[in-house]
Amino acid sequence: MRLKKEELFFVTSFEQASILRKYAILFLVSSVIPMVLLYYVYFKSTRIGHIAMLLMVTGVLVGYFSIRTLLTRAISIAEENRKAIEPFLKPEIFKELSKEKNELMALNHLFSAMTKQLEANIKELRSKNEELKTLDRLKDDFVNNVSHELRLPLTVIQESIRQIGEGMFGKVNDLQMKYIHMSLRNIDRLRALIDNMLDIAKIEKGKLELLKKNVDVSQIIKEVISDFTFKIEKKGLALKAALPDQPLWATVDKDKITQVLINLVGNACKFTEKGRIIVSACDRGDLIECSVEDSGIGIPPQEMPHLFSKFHQIGRLKNQPEKGTGLGLVISKHIIELHNGQIHAQNLEGTGTKFTFTLPKSPGGL
Amino acid sequence: MKKILIIDDDVDIIDLVTNRLERNNYEVIFSNDGDNGVKKALEQKPDLIIIDVMMPRLPGPEAVKLLKSYEGTQNIPILFFTAMNSYLPPNTEFDDINVGGQFFPSIPKPFDPNRLLSCVRLLLGE
């Protein structure tokens, strides 16, 4: 409960008057004592002395009583006033005064306790933050070291098997060759996994940087297609490019867009047993639109929403010849989004899948 | 016959790269660490140095700084050979490694033998 200004005035005037009344008696005593002393020292036994003494004592007494009366009146007026406002004032008001003081003290106490707690929390958070930063650095070093330590033995294994396969150490028979190829294929898988894991680690740390240059997107597509031609012909598929005659200039990171196209064409190849794969690109004003279309088994509708999620792989298919890392599309999506573009997939009527992505032509995006 | 010096702390890598290079008619000498590598380069004056990045004691880039500071070795072309991809600046077109403002070509491990050979030929001016 809070006191209003007027209420406070009544309460304080009443209290002050009570205090003054107590001091009035002190005034009386303190003025009589010097008068009596004066009388005995100077005016002893003279007539004028007697009269003066009498007058002074009378004056002091009159003064005392009149002050007392005035104060008593003031107190009674204050008391009357108090009584008059009492219905509005509530009897606890005088308690409230000290209660408010207590409340304030309690609040003050609480605040200082809270401040201390906050300071302790901030301190703890700071040290936790430092700890996390150190851990993060260690994790970075660890990821870099692990990738280094994984790549080195892989290099030795891959190159050794390759050299055996090339017949550097003697003729290789067909059966040996079959297993050499099997080993090399799996080494490639392991290598792709390591590279993808590193890419994901970089993406999650926001450290995947683009080196954008003005390049012809058609040219990138042509290069990717020529890399795949051998593999695709072996499978009996047709790989075609549908590109406009004029170059498609865009400011993009060539290596990264190549990576996306390799991933999409690789997927198309993986899930297509017969038919064709078409990579196309066209000019859409501010954007360049690329798509990779296959005549494969398509994407089961229930898998569509998870297509670009980490480690998600299209459910184990009976005749799926190759497995991936489950990271390719996640990385592709990040790369396209870093370019301010978009990527999506759709099933084609009948059979097949089409992945489409867009790339803004200008470096700053749209 | 052109002489190539390989500096790598991994003996298996040296073995395998030596196989490749010798089969392509190059003379190969090697060293297992940066210090000795620099010494060997000064003594034998190879036509090309293939050097690892991550090596104990004297890392590749430090060794290259030394090689470039000696008159006898400063003109020998350098080819870095590394599995440490994060060492490379992101997406540099030829995976160049920057040592004190100077750029040197690099081949990542695991390596493509054809790319290794074509790089070697290019640096030897063949």
Image (cartoon, coloured by chain):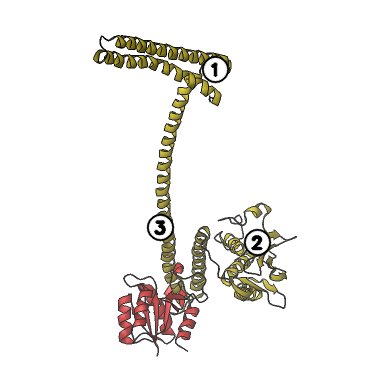
Chain colours: A yellow, B red
Q: Is residue A43 left or right of residue A244?
A: left
Where residue A90 is drawn, which disc sits there? 1
Q: Mark 1 belongs to which amino acid? A: Lys
Q: Which residue sits at x=47%, y=85%?
A: B121
Mark toward the start of the polypeptide (1 vs 2): 1
Mark toward the start of the polypeptide (1 vs 3): 1
- Secondary structure type for disc 3: helix
- Secondary structure type for disc 2: strand
Q: Which residue is mark 2?
A: A343
Where residue A25 is drawn, which disc sits there? none
Question: Is disc 3 in the same subunit as disc 2?
Answer: yes
Q: Are marks 1 and 2 in contact (CB under 8 Å)?
A: no
Task: Examine the rendered structure and indicate whether residue B72 appears above or below residue A137.
Answer: below
Where residue A138 is drawn, which disc sits there? 3
- Secondary structure type for disc 1: loop
Q: Which residue sits at x=52%, y=14%?
A: A77
Q: Mark 2 belongs to which amino acid? A: Ile
Image quadrant where residue B46 sits: bottom left
Q: Chain of mark 2?
A: A
Please tell me which residue lies in front, A301 or B83. Answer: B83
Crowd class of label 1 (few under 14; some 14 to 19; many from 20; radius 10 Å): few
Question: Is disc 1 in the same subunit as disc 2?
Answer: yes
Q: Which residue sits at x=65%, y=53%?
A: A305
**Residue A271 at x, y = what percent?**
64, 63
Q: Mark 3 belongs to which amino acid? A: Leu
